[in-house]
Amino acid sequence: MKKEGLIMNDFRFYNPVRIHFGQSSLNKLPKELAAVGKTILLAYGGGSIKRTGLYNRVMAILEDCGKEVVELSGIMPNPRTEKVYEGIELCKKHNVDFILAVGGGSTIDCSKAIAVGACTDRDFWEAFYLNNEAAEAAIPLGVVLTIPATGSEMDRSAVITHWETGVKTDYNSDLTFPKFSILDPTLTYTLPKNQMINGIVDTLSHIWELYFSEPDTDSVTDNLAEALMRSVIAATRVAIKEPEDYIARSNIMWASTVALCGMIGNGKNSDWASHNIEHAISALFDVAHGAGLAVVHPTYMAYFCQNAPERYARYAVNVWGVDPTGKTALEVAREGVQCTRDFFNEIGAPATLTDLGVPESAIDDLVAHTDMGAWAYKKMTQDDVRAILRMAL
Ligand code: NZQ
Ligand code: ZN
């Protein structure tokens, strides 16, 4: 018999993204491109792909495939509405058949928003982001991933910032799943250390948002989550010392994709409170998403673990190897949170709002900009958010 809150929630799992993983996976691009129309929007960020040589490799493939290329460059981290409008205009003007996003979550999310925005005469921000209307069509898109972090390469979410109003939020549609994603771990060797760390923090944070929620009796999903966390932690320690360790980079890359492809959320309620607090920070201060999470998520854990001590204790034991003998669940839980903080210190992640350049005077504004719709175990209030931000100063 079903006992609410104890057994797996009913769920729908759908993920149509074709993944090409490995150090020669870019070789799969010509075959993927053969199946799509002639005019391609090549979307990328602020120039890293030019510095690393990836731009030339991709352009050569596009040329060999006889494609006409329209370029959208300069997609900024925390992509803004104006970049989406620019892409929509290019797609409409050139009758773009397919969008190829080469980069990280920012480039992919901007491309997804363009994909739906270019297929309507409505204002994309108002229709999809403010009114959450269902998109009826989208330009198909594909991905060459350069930074493991957001999972956008295998999910249907597109996070965009409206800078003027300080709103950073997501839009989700089955139409915005990429058709394919190319995951070559060697493309991540060029990541600056801080970007690598940001991506790793984001990956762990996605797993935590799902793992720390009911139902939390033993489940396949929770066991998968713990294995993923252990893999990420072990691989991070290797990749920091040896950035070109292929095994470590592969594990980091695949873990970040799996973390948000739906598998780790199946049957769970999910939380997303830390993400919502962080989105307010990056919407108002334009900090990197992973850096914001490095400050917010461990603080949130420290503040909230008393509401689910058994679950946090399980995390402490199964992920960090904390010895529970003779301790209460809450004591074990707190040790697990401390292990999390110690790990972030060890890898050089930011620890405080001050590290991010966010002053105490901004706290009320941040509270006002935090979406209060997501929480786990205990309904989050604005006072909770204020207390967490104060603890993070
Ligand atoms: O812009 P370029 O010059 O390409 O440089 C980028 C950028 O500065 C650089 N970079 C990427 N790959 C590189 C590289 N530098 C050297 N070598 C490489 N191989 O890294 C910087 C960060 O890139 P970005 O795409 O901004 O990072 P990330 O993948 O973390 O994306 C962050 C955005 O995704 C959103 C975040 O809020 C943020 O806006 N998220 C998207 C989600 C989703 N779609 O499911 C979920 C997440 O929770 C998140 O909210
Ligand atoms: Zn995230």
Image: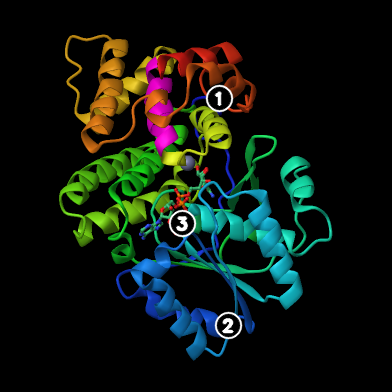
Tell me the distance, in whole angstroms, between the alpha carbons under discs 3 and 2. Answer: 24 Å
Q: Where is residue 290 in the image (x, y as percent from the top left)?
A: 42, 40
The local crowd at label 3, few if under 14, some if 14 to 19, many if 20 or more residues have their Cα within 10 Å, is many
Name the mark nearer the viewer: 3 or 2: 3
Circle 1: residue type: Trp
**Which residue bears the numbered disc 2?**
35
Q: Where is residue 162 in the image (x, y as percent from the top left)?
A: 67, 42
Q: Which of 321 and 386 is in front in this view?
A: 386
337 w.r.t. 64: above or below:
above
The local crowd at label 1, few if under 14, some if 14 to 19, many if 20 or more residues have their Cα within 10 Å, is some
The C terminus, quarter of image? top left
**Which residue bears the numbered disc 3?**
104
Color theme of the render: rainbow
Asked whether disc 2 touches disc 1, contact meaning CB atoms under 8 Å apart, the reply is no
Q: Is mark 1 on a helix, strand or loop?
A: loop
Residue at 78%, 42% in the rendered image: 131
**Which residue bears the numbered disc 1?**
375
Q: Where is residue 382 in the image (x, y as percent from the top left)?
A: 60, 15
Residue at 20%, 17% in the rendered image: 324
Q: Nearer the viewer, residue 295 or 141?
A: 295
Q: Is mark 2 within 8 Å of ligand 1?
A: no
The residues colored magenta run: 291-302
Q: Does the magenta stretch include residue 300?
A: yes
Q: Is mark 3 on a helix, strand or loop?
A: loop
